Amino acid sequence: MDNIALVIITALISGLLATIITIWWQRRTRIFSSKLRIFETLMAYRYMISSEESVKALNSIDIIFYKDKAVRDAYKDFLIEAEKKPELNPNIADKHLKLLEEMSKVLKLGEIHWDDIKRTYYPKGLSEKVQEETILRKMQIQNAAAAIQHEGIQENTPSSDQFSQQLFAQILPELLKNPESLKSLLEIGAKYGGKK
């Protein structure tokens, strides 16, 4: 009888221990995966720190790396530099690189060093695309402001010019999602917004 009780107790303890170890390991793996995902995002967008993806990843650091003091300190230093006026923060790129370096240490990516992180690939075509998207956004804001100003001056009855502007304003957000070129946008603008 004592032998059966010992077998049952041993089975329960080993099952409980296996469950606890499994839960601990899964949690540890999940945390490591989250840290790695943030690091990968910041590395992928290090050529443009202000991109939406990079900003989301940066804003996740405090929660994902909550136990990693060196990373959080580097993040605070980065934020202090980022809060300065653009003409006063020439060190922001170095603070960003230092943050990435601290993250690579926490992730135990020993072969990734400052010089590796500093190198980026940013082709001319991507640079031109980003510039075109910026121009498109500025045009959209200018058109929206002009439409609001125009509506304040005009009567409540829509004219063909207002209809063209409204149609252009509806088409423009779709073009911003996947702009092929500034030239095609200008052609559409001339077609719908330029007729009077």
Image: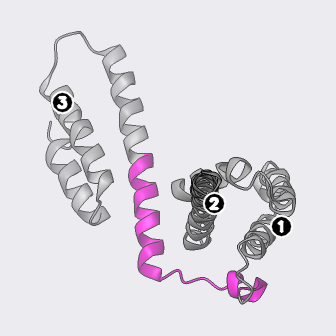
Q: Residues within 10 Å of mark 1 (few under 14, many from 20)?
A: few
Depth-wise, is mark 3 or mark 2 nearer the camera? 2
- Indicate which disc, 1 or 2, sits on the residue closer to the N terminus: 2
Residue 69 on image: x %, y %: 86, 58
* Residue occupying the point 16% across, 43% down: 192
Residue 157 on image: x %, y %: 16, 12
* Magenta-drawn stretch, dominant element (helix, strand or loop): helix
| Kind of residue at badge 3 | Asp
Residue 84 on image: x %, y %: 82, 50
Query: In the rendering, which numbered label is found on residue 91?
Result: 1
Number of numbered markers: 3
| Kind of residue at badge 2 | Ile
Query: In the rendering, which numbered label is found on residue 21?
Result: 2
Q: Which residues are magenta?
A: 112-138
Instruction: Tell me where residue 45 sits by quadrant.
Output: bottom right
* Residue occupying the point 77% across, 53% down: 82
Query: In the rendering, which numbered label is found on residue 161?
Result: 3
- Indicate which disc, 3 or 1, sits on the residue closer to the N terminus: 1
Q: CA distance from mark 3 to mark 1?
A: 49 Å
